[in-house]
Structures are given as C-alpha cells and as structure tokens.
Amino acid sequence: MYATEQFAELNKVGVANATRFAALSIENAEKLFRLNVTAAKAAFAHGVENAQAVAGVRDVQELFALRAKVAEENVQAAVGYGRTLYALASEAQGEYTAIAEDAWNTYSKGVSAIVDKAAKSAPAGSDAAVNAFRSTFAASTAAFDQFQRATKQVVSLADASVRAAAASTAKPAKGRK
C-alpha cells in the first residue's frame, strides 16, 4: 500500500514538472516572439530610413558611402540580434536543465525510498534481487550524473566559442569605417 502512495506522489511530481516545463516553454516562446517583432519593426524602420537616404543621393561617391554605412549598420544589427537570441537560448537551456535536474533528484529519492521500503518487507532470500536492483539503480544514477557533467562542459565550451565568434565578428565590422 505504501509503495502505491509513493508511486502516486511521484506521478504528482511528474505532472507538476510537466506543467512547469510547458509554462516555461510558453514563456520562452513569448520572449522569442517579442524579439522577432522588435527586430522586424527595427528592420522596417531601417529600410524606410535607407530608402529615404538613397532617394537623396546626389552622386556615385555618396551612394558608395551610403552603401558602406548601411552594410555596417546591417552587420551590427545582425550581430546584436544573434547575441540577444543566444542569450535567450542560453537562459532557456539553464531553466530547462534546472527542471530536469530537479525532476531527476525527486525521482531518484522516490525510487530509493520505494526500494528501501520494499527491501524491508521482502521475503527471505530476496536479498540478491534487491541488491541487484539497488546496484543497477546506483549505476544509472551515476551514469546520469556523468552525462550531466559532460553536458555542462559541452555547453560551457559552446558558450565560449559562440561568444568568441560574436566578438570577432563585431570587431572587423567596426574597423572598416
């Protein structure tokens, strides 16, 4: 009976985590939508401004200077958009990771408690089966922890690479004026 209650509690926690995950997904979709609407408005305003500037060009040199200025502004806008998009994605990834870690910790504790309870009420001679299950569960927990550490390292390396690439992209554009 106790194990049934524990399973029910684990299910409730699972539903709560799924709800958190869904709410977070909607929140992040809204952030992305706002970013894209803002970027679209800025691109439209920039396009109108550039069209007006082109309409006022008097000679070829002025046209080439305007072209260089517009290209510079477009590179800066694209780099800025990319940085903001990356920041949103990094933030979301961190939040999803926190939910997954919390869910795994809750699940691990719940299963461990169920196994402990089952072991206490298990019939004589079932020690080998209980120990085998505990060993398997401990191995899966260790594997998850190792995977989690490796994932964090990969994310950290990718983050450093993206930041370095963004920094190097912005520098040459500034130097061309």
Image (cartoon, grey):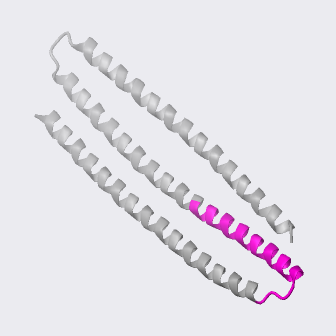
Question: Would residue 138 be found to the left or right of residue 161 on screen?
Answer: left
Q: Nearer the viewer, residue 50 or 171?
A: 50
**Residue at coordinates 48% horizontally, 72% vertically from top-left?**
34
**Residue at coordinates 30% horizontally, 31% vertically from top-left?**
112
Helix, strand or loop for the magenta stretch, by majority: helix
Q: Nearer the viewer, residue 38 or 48?
A: 48
Q: Position of residue 149 (x, y in %)?
A: 54, 37
- With respect to residue 151, does 128 lie above or below? above
The picture quadrant where one finds residue 127 is top left
Q: Position of residue 42 (x, y in %)?
A: 60, 78
Q: Position of residue 21 (x, y in %)?
A: 36, 54
- With respect to residue 37, does 162 lie above or below? above
- With respect to residue 1, does 38 lie above or below? below
**Residue at coordinates 57% horizontally, 62% vertically from top-left?**
85
Please say whether residue 84 is one of the residues in the magenta stretch: yes
Numbered range of the magenta stretch: 56-85
- With respect to residue 158, does 108 lie above or below? above
Which of the image's four quarters has the C terminus?
A: bottom right
Question: Would residue 7 be found to the left or right of residue 157 on screen?
Answer: left
**Residue at coordinates 30% horizontally, 55% vertically from top-left?**
19
Q: Nearer the viewer, residue 36 or 155?
A: 36
Looking at this view, name the residue that lies furthest to the top. Answer: 125
